[in-house]
Structures are given as structure tokens and as C-alpha cells.
Image: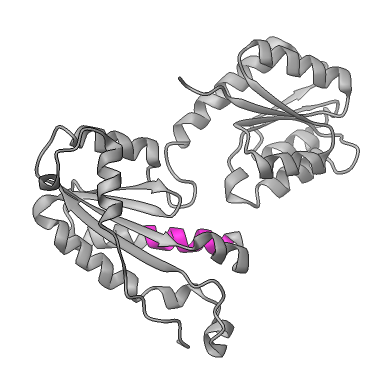
Amino acid sequence: MTRPYKILIVEDDPNTAEMLRAYFETQGYQVLTAAWGSEAIQVCQDTVPDLIIEDIRLPDIDGYQVVHELRKHTRTSNVPIIFLTERQAHDDRIAGLRLGAVAYLAKPFDMQELHLRVRNALRRASYTSLVSPVTGLPVRQVTEEWLRQMTTQTGWGIVYISVCNVESFSEAYGFVAGDDVVRAVGLIIGHAVDQVGMLDDQVGHINQAGFVLVTQESRVDEMRDALTNRLSKAFNYFYPIRDLQTGQVTSPMRVEIGAISASAGPFDHPQAIIDAVTGACQAIDVQPPTES
């Protein structure tokens, strides 16, 4: 069963907030509410909504500032925003659109129009949700569909690449740095496919820092070795120079890589393939961080 879309309503007027909450819940949406801008930011940090309906005039910070903060973080950077406001000036609309708002409705608003705007925004967002906002590669939903098709096929091979300890690295050096690592690994895999892979090779995510490369059974060992060689040399560049110079690298990461082929089967489900290839993983002998 498909989960209901999650909408965050940011509105300090209790009557309007309750009206919106009741209406969208009857339409089958899961609704979260916040009356303050800072509260909305905290809600999004805990649970990323699929869409936000937001008043611009809030008791603490205005809606523009809320959106500006959300756009700083990868997890919330692409959440669709619909502004509801009493401000109708041209400059206010332009300010909202510059922040990436998908709609700007003046109060009093038509509920049916709002619902149509919400539905259309969610439909558009569902298309982009099939790729990682960090790497641009297909997410697990797409990757599992590849694997599902492979359960009835022969002649394939899979290489699994996992970057371990990214979460701790991000806590130490910032989430932007963590995203940069994941993005760089995705590019390294893509470049390896361009250089030694085949035109029909596919790369996607199993999780945020876990990648699968689908290739031919006859080439799986070559692709694994090529990626091992490239990744073992890459990780010095992910740490700040000052830490490399002092030898005090915080939260060092490691890379694990594994490979299997169709002959290791049979496999009756995508998860069986995932379990097999992750079980075949071994840590890459990454060069210890040293001064470049």
C-alpha cells in the first residue's frame, strides 16, 4: 500500500490552521502543523514533508527565512512550497518565486484551487523523487525494479560499493562535506563505467551511501577491480588539508566492495540479490590519510 503524502502546514492563525488540517486529512493526506517558523524548521529536520503550505507572516521569523533555511540542506532543499499570504504586492510574489515556491496564493484563497495546486506540485515532485538529489542517480525504488527483472534473467553481474561511516564524517565536518563524498563516489563509479564499462551498464543507489553497478557477468570482476583501484586512491581528498597535515583526521571513512553474478543464484527476489552482494563485500585497503 502506498503511504499517504505528508503535508506540513505552517500557519499561526489557529482557525486557518485547523481548517486546512481538517480539509487535507479528509482528502487522505497526513498533516503536520507548526505555528512558528522555528518550529517548522525543527519539524522538517525530524520528518521531511512531501510539501509545505506556509503563511509568510509568522510570529518569529517570516516564511521567506524558513524557506531559505530549508534550502540550505539537501534533505529539504527540494520540498515544494506553497505560500499563503495577505501580502499581494508584486515584489512579495517575486521574492517567493525566487526561493523556488511552486505557488503564491493570496488570502482569502479558494480551497479547491489550493488542493489542485497541491496535487499538481506533488505529482511533479514524484517524478524527481526517483533520483538522488545528491548524485542524480536512481534511488532504491528504481534499482530494486532492475533487480526484480534480473531474477528471471541470466548473464548479469553486480558490483556493490558502500561508503561506511559517512554519518560520523558528516557530523564532524558538516553535512555538505558528507554529501560531497557521496557525490564524488557516484562520479568515480560513473567515470569507471565510461572508461571500462558497457553502454547498457546501470548505476543506482541501494541507500544514501550504497551503490550498485549492474553489468555483464563476464565483466563483473574487471569492473570490481577498476573501482577498487580508483576508490582506494580517492579518500585523501575528502579530508581538510589541516587535518591531513596534523594527522588528526576525525571519523575516518572506509569503503566496502563486493561482486556477484547470476551464476551465484537462483534469486527469487530483489532483496535476495542485495543480501548476496552485500554479504560478499570486503573492505578496500584505502590509503591512510596523509598530507597531499
Query: Residue at the location (48% across, 51% down)?
Result: 134
* Residue 179 is covered by the magenta coloring: yes
* Residue 112 is covered by the magenta coloring: no
> Residue 56, located in which quarter of the rendered image?
top right
Q: Left or right of 222: which side holds 74?
A: right
Q: Position of residue 173 (x, y in %)?
A: 60, 68
* Whether residue 287 can be seen here: yes
> Residue 61, located in which quarter of the rendered image?
top right
Quadrant location, the C terminus = bottom left
Main structural element of the magenta stretch: helix, strand or loop?
helix
Write the start and end of the magenta stretch as one range: 176-186
Number of marks in the rendered image: 0
Q: Position of residue 290 (x, y in %)?
A: 45, 86
Q: Left or right of 63: which side holds 277?
A: left
Q: Position of residue 247 (x, y in %)?
A: 53, 87
Residue in the foreground of this view, choosing between 200 and 252: 252
Above or below, 134 against 242 in this view is above
User: What is the basis of the colouring in this image?
Assistant: one colour
Query: Residue at the location (25% across, 62% down)?
Result: 192
Q: Left or right of 193: which side holds 39?
A: right
Quadrant location, the N terminus = top left
Residue in the foreground of this view, choosing between 281 and 26: 281
Q: Left or right of 38: which side holds 184?
A: left
> Residue 102, located in which quarter of the rendered image?
top right
